[in-house]
Amino acid sequence: MKLFQHVSDIGDLRKALDEAFEIKADRYKYQHLGKNKTAMLIFFNNSLRTRLSTQKAALNLGMNVIVLDVNQGAWKLETERGVIMESDKSEHLLEAIPVMGSYCDLIGVRSFARFESRTDDYEEKILNQFIKYSGRPVFFMESATVHPLQAFADLITIEEYKDKTLIEPNPLFGGNALRRTPNKRPKVVLSWAPHPKALPQAVPNSFAEWMNAANVDFVITHPEGYELDPLFAGAAHVEYDQMKAFENADFIYAKNWSCPGVTRPNDYGKLLGDYHDYASWTVSDRQMAVTNNAFFMHCLPVRRNMIVTDQVIEAPTSLVIPEAANREISATVVLKRMLQSL
Ligand code: CP
């Protein structure tokens, strides 16, 4: 695998999941693959989980790891071609990328949407330059439009829990939860939730893309105007009534995202209205009561009592910690596949 951006890059999902569970049972099984190989992780934006889990994945595979926070210690990078470089940006991405590539075997990049231009964001202007000029396999660690390492970890988590009638004690808060009617094909709901800042669409885009490819019944719920790009939403059922969407759900995946600019092109990257007016969308016991004792998921970091109440995220059915832990597994599978393709 030379590129990890879309669900199609991982190929057969059943095979990828089997590989994930193989690695979960013995995460050092492929330690020999990374000997004398280096992973470079480039961060244009902050991270906790992606930074730590991807480093751990590289270490699981016996790799060396170099982490660069572009905005802390590196030269400020110009990303536009053709500009006269008279600002505080001392280096151009077009030189920096091949230099980075010369020090490593694989490159992971995090570069969020800038919300300056929908076209630039949705054409993945930054990440595509890494693909073109680094000379190395590139994996997306959350780009302007996708977060595939997260979506793969989410799928692993759903696969792990979909048939469970009794879940293990919640690692944070203890307790067991009985699911009422385990399903073979679970109902998974992606729910928009309020947030005080405009957030990118990368997580919901990838979650939608991966759920559409998985063996689940997938529903998206959000207020009008937040329609995801059809490239990712595909044929998923969109239900504007959140309570109706939650009925008999097995998994609730909450996330905020800003206007994707599909039905309201002039509002791309904006909040549509005052978030206080959307308080009823915060995931609480009220909505969870109509589900099939659903598991709660969120990619983290999460704003409590904004996206989800304390009660729901602390309930035994909250999967946020095992979901985050699976980031190590998804990253190990992806880096392993890339090492095998060198
Ligand atoms: N979920 C996720 O990507 O977390 P970080 O932003 O902390 O990496």
Image (cartoon, rainbow, N blue to C red):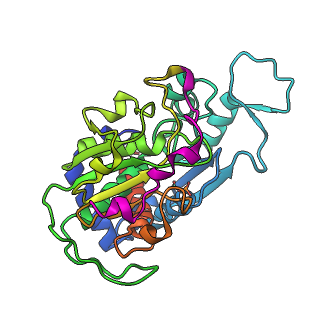
Boundaries of the magenta span: 266-290
Q: Is residue 11 left or right of residue 337?
A: left
Q: Is residue 292 left or right of residue 271?
A: left
Residue found farthest to the top: 82
Numbered-mark total: 0
- The question of residue 249 being in magenta is answered with no
95 or 150, which lies in front? 150
Q: Is residue 69 left or right of residue 147?
A: right
| Image vertical order of residue 297 relative to residue 76, above or below | below
Image quadrant containing the C terminus: top left
Q: Residue at x 77, y 32 (%)?
A: 91
Confirm whether residue 150 shows in the render: yes
| Image vertical order of residue 304 relative to residue 150, above or below | below
Task: Pinpoint residue 239: horizontal percent, then vertical percent.
Answer: 30, 39
Q: Residue at x 35, y 84 (%)?
A: 175
Task: Pinpoint residue 168: horizontal percent, then vertical percent.
Answer: 31, 80
Confirm whether residue 10 shows in the render: no
Image quadrant containing the N terminus: top left
Task: Pinpoint residue 54: horizontal percent, then vertical percent.
Answer: 50, 58
- The question of residue 282 being in magenta is answered with yes
Q: Residue at x 57, y 45 (%)?
A: 275
192 or 81, which lies in front? 192
293 or 62, which lies in front? 293
93 or 326, which lies in front? 326
Task: Pinpoint residue 209: horizontal percent, then vertical percent.
Answer: 33, 40
| Image vertical order of residue 265 relative to residue 149, above or below | above
